[in-house]
Image (cartoon, helix red, strand yellow):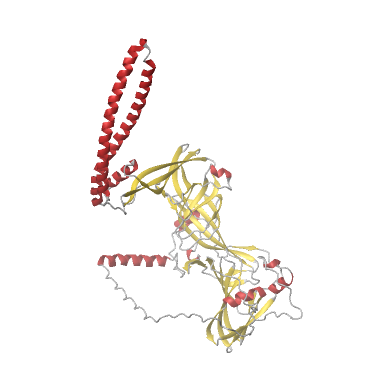
Amino acid sequence: MRFVTPQWSFIAALMSVSAFGCARGPNVASDLPLRRVVVYRNGVGYFERSGKVDSEQVKFRMRGRMVGDFLATLAIVERGGGTVRSASFPIDVEDEAHPAPPPVPMPENRAQVPGRDAAEANALREVVLALDGQKHDLSIGYVAETPVWRPSYRVVVKEGNQADLQTWGIVQNLSGEPWQNVELVLVAGAPIAFQSTLGTPVVPERPVVNDQGEVIAAVPTGETSLAEAPAAAPPPPEAPAAEPEEAEAAAPAASMKKAESARGQGAGAPRPMAAPAPAAQRLAVSRASLSAPRRVSALAAVALESGNTRYALPEKVTVPDGSATMVLLLHQSVPGAAVFLFAPDPGVPDSSAHPFRVVRFTNGTSGLLERGPIAVFEKGSFLGEGVLEPLPPKATATVPFALERGLGVQSDHRYEELGARILKIEASQLWIERDQVHKTSYKVKNGGADRAHVLVKHPRAQGARLHQPPPGTEDNVGTGTALVPVDVAPFGTAELVVDERTPYQQPVGWLDPLADVSVKAYLADPRSDQKIVAALSQAWVIRDKLRDLNDERTRLTTEQADLQRSTQETRLNLKALEKNKGAADLVQKLTERLRKDGDRLDAITKRLIEIELSAREQDVRFRDAIRDITLVSPPAPKD
């Protein structure tokens, strides 16, 4: 498949669409010629008419449903001559003897409004602008409903992580009149625009006042506000003198900004024509690009005004009534590539086991790319279609266009708790922070002969942080997902582990093993407060002694309980053998065991008393050592 560059024209294609009927008139008409049309993405358009008038009035004819919007947004600029005094329009007055039936709610599709309401909405009304004087040079702008313009994209993937991107705009004219040689501007944005009813008379109900006298039964309480002197304005801050090094750094930055503005990706001003490239270079560009325009200066000027991206066509265009016109807005080389994306979608059942083929590219313009269909090409072949979501400037889009069954993906999930670090020490109480660790492993198998670069769209756990993510990971905070890359060798298998950690806090006792882990980690951190390190180190020597005493007490207490149980069992056995003369040897053996167990019990009891006294002493020393330690800002955790 070979792409042939067509003769460049802004009006690339005219597609006939059905209108309301051949006899349908214009929605808004006037003797003033239409000069400029701005189409938005919210169902309205801005129309500007201008010209010289040798009369005392200018007449507009419009549908009844258009009157309110016309009056609410009417803007008049006098470039010479008199001024506009007033704007008059007719209104419907009901006959009191035959009142009109209650209004029928207006459905979304106004063309299907039945009966009288439909006739009134489509009936022509005349709005007369009264002028002061005979000679006028007017420019009149207003807003009227019009179909939204819709974008369509083409992207050709090339070698070297580059791609050609085209942006087209489809404009539909259902206004009832042709837009002949108008300045056309497409706005990628939807400013608030509500339907106005200024053309419909409204008389609100008012309360009826009955004068029957009034008696005040209680004295009302008033409220007094004392006068206050106005607050003195703060002195203006003194501008710091620029350092010589900063001044030298600012100069090239300003010149670079000026140069970027002159290149004009975000500027609305026309740009000078570049010198023509050599014939060989032009031929190479023609073969590598997708219908590349021959005149770069003929592309739409992109500008950001009041938060909206505007595409202003540099040449006037004609959009016939009842038709759709497709115009080329942008064509540029952008960073891009065709890769794979594992993103399970409920609407595509097999996507839970296979990744999508996707095209990734960066919006290199200074404007917003609206949502629209996108066709993907590579090496002269059509690969598929996808939908581009709204793409801000400098952002990167990942658009699926096919499902790749040559790659298989299997996922697994496990949970554990790791780490212990000091959170704070207050009032002799230790708080630590641990991590709830969620590990998701993705096993990717490649059944093809080419190396595969796969992006895994991982759903992020709320409040968790990525722990040591692979290089190239994109953490998308707005969507709550992360794109994690993994490369798979031909006919090979690769495993990707996504580690997410959520911190949680808990109080622990000073003798708890987690306390020992967290304190020793703080003592070993060079970022720690050295005064607190010294105090904790002294306290921890005492704490280790106290811990050893408690461990010994626990061990001896367990041994004591075992010996008591053993001696009790031995006594019962001796009592059972005391009348058996033939078991003298066994009685002697059990008696010796009972004696040894008794001696060991006496030694354990003595040692437990000593441990108890020593443990109490060490506990008092430890409490005194940590009494003045306060830690509220420990170093941040390290991954």
Q: Position of residue 70 (x, y in %)?
A: 60, 76
Where is 329 relative to 26, above or below?
Answer: above
Viewer can see residue 505: yes
Q: Is residue 101 left or right of residue 143?
A: right
Q: Please, which residue is most extreme toward the top here?
A: 582
Nearer to us in this view, 551 or 116: 551
Quadrant of residue 110 within the rendered picture: bottom right
Q: Residue at x 45, y 54 (%)?
A: 477
Viewer can see residue 381: no
Where is 126 relative to 616, above or below?
Answer: below
Q: Please, which residue is most extreme toward the front here?
A: 579
Q: Position of residue 232 (x, y in %)?
A: 34, 78
Q: Residue at x 27, y 28 (%)?
A: 602
Nearer to us in this view, 409 or 323: 409
Q: Position of residue 184 (x, y in %)?
A: 55, 69
Q: Please, which residue is most extreme toward the right here?
A: 97
Q: Residue at x 53, y 50 (%)?
A: 400
Where is 328 relative to 2, above or below?
Answer: below
Nearer to us in this view, 119 or 319: 119
Quadrant of residue 318 within the rendered picture: bottom right
Q: Is residue 424 left or right of residue 413?
A: left
